[in-house]
Amino acid sequence: DMGGHDTYMHKEISEQPDAVDRVLRGRIDERFATVRLGGLNLDAREARTIRRIKILGCGTSYHAGLIGAGLIESLARVPADAEPASEFRYRNPVVDPDTLYIAVSQSGETYDVLAAVQELKRKGARVLGVVNVVGSAIAREADGGMYVHAGPEVCVVSTKCFTNTVVAFALLALHLGRIRDLSVSDGKRIIEGLRRLPEQIQQILQAEAEIKKLADQYADAKSMMFIGRVRGYPVALEASLKLKEISYIHAEAYPASELKHGPLALIEPALPTVAIVPDDDLLEKNRAALEEIKARSGRILAVAHQEQEKADHTVVVPKNEPELDPILMGIPLQLLAYHTALSLGRDIDKPRNLAKSVTVE
Ligand code: F6R
């Protein structure tokens, strides 16, 4: 049942304010400015002994893991990174007893992720799951974890589950941070930011007509470049994946800082760039990248907290706390991919060559 929407993807994008509300519900502990996560099976003493966090997932879940790693590093100050589960599995990784491993999956059935979890467990590692489907294989195999409570996701490409997974990582990062060195005031600041998310997402969804107009203008592109820096880079990766999957337009994502090391050679009027430009300590650096693109006559669509002078178009999104801004900046780009695919007449809920869950190697 699409509940009045033309596609499941549209329905699922629209459900995000409620979905985010669900992942937060019952977990916030105001008194200690922290989060209660009953299913982790990790007490405070154990949490303090973690020296590293390694996040594993595929596709969109891997991208959510990249943002998650950034959140964990900034809030909990534990070194963290994310890697595609399949790559991890095939390179005979060093499994370290002081590392906490986290497997991320919407379906909980992705074979490469499940196999990585089984291999890690065989070697004695502790593995948590950040999973949407309750009781799925990865959820059962993990030592503990969190459900992301996005609700059923029917469209082949992931939208609301991506957003909820990132919010789940923010909760985990806050939880670990408050056990370690995150102050009460920073804990409160993040909690207040989390509480603002559903309404701010709603606000972004209200700009759909404007984003549709932009999508119609960019739909003739043969290829698109997505750029971001630090927190913005995984947002660019995910936006580029979403566009490829449903519109079949070729897209690449690069860290803005890497442009001058090669991809700048591609920039010309026929290759539009989507730039993630949050109003944070990297704003000036990001503006400089826009200038470099403009100097090569590249068209620019910015997603930013304020109108960007160098951009041809800016989608202005509401500002939250800098750590949480990537969550909001991804939303208009889901709509951009959606309306681009729609204007090209694609089968949005069932893109060619793709399956919702990849249970084979
Ligand atoms: C992207 C997409 C895929 C999945 C990937 C992992 O829109 O749907 O990239 O994210 O196959 O799937 P899960 O999260 O079920 O493990």
Image (spheres, rainbow, N blue to C red):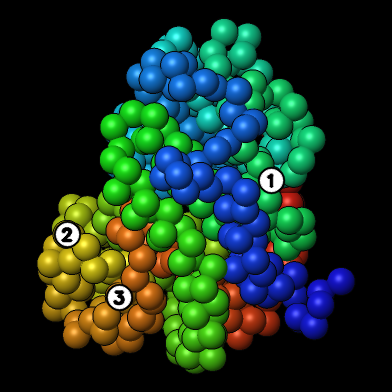
Residue 326 on image: x %, y %: 39, 59
Say which element carries label 1.
loop
Camera sees residue 273? no
Rendered image: mark on residue 132 = 1
Return the residue at label 2.
281
Give the side of residue 198 with respect to residue 137, left or right: left
Say whether mark 1 is within 8 Å of ligand 1. yes
Q: Residue at x 73, y 62 (%)?
A: 155
Residue 61 on image: x %, y %: 56, 46
Rendered image: mark on residue 145 = none
Q: Quadrant of residue 338?
A: bottom right
Q: Residue at x 38, y 76 (%)?
A: 317
Say which element carries label 3.
loop
Q: Is disc 3 surrounded by few (<14), some (14 to 19) or many (20+) residues within 10 Å?
A: many
Give the side of residue 158 with respect to residue 275, left or right: right
Give the mark nearest the N terminus, 2 or 3.
Answer: 2
The CA span between labels 1 and 3 is 30 Å
Say whether mark 3 is within 8 Å of ligand 1. no
* Amino acid type, residue under disc 1 in the picture: Asn
Give the mark nearest the N terminus, 1 or 2.
Answer: 1
Q: Is disc 1 surrounded by few (<14), some (14 to 19) or many (20+) residues within 10 Å?
A: many
Residue 222 on image: x %, y %: 46, 74
Q: Nearer the viewer, residue 100 or 94?
A: 100
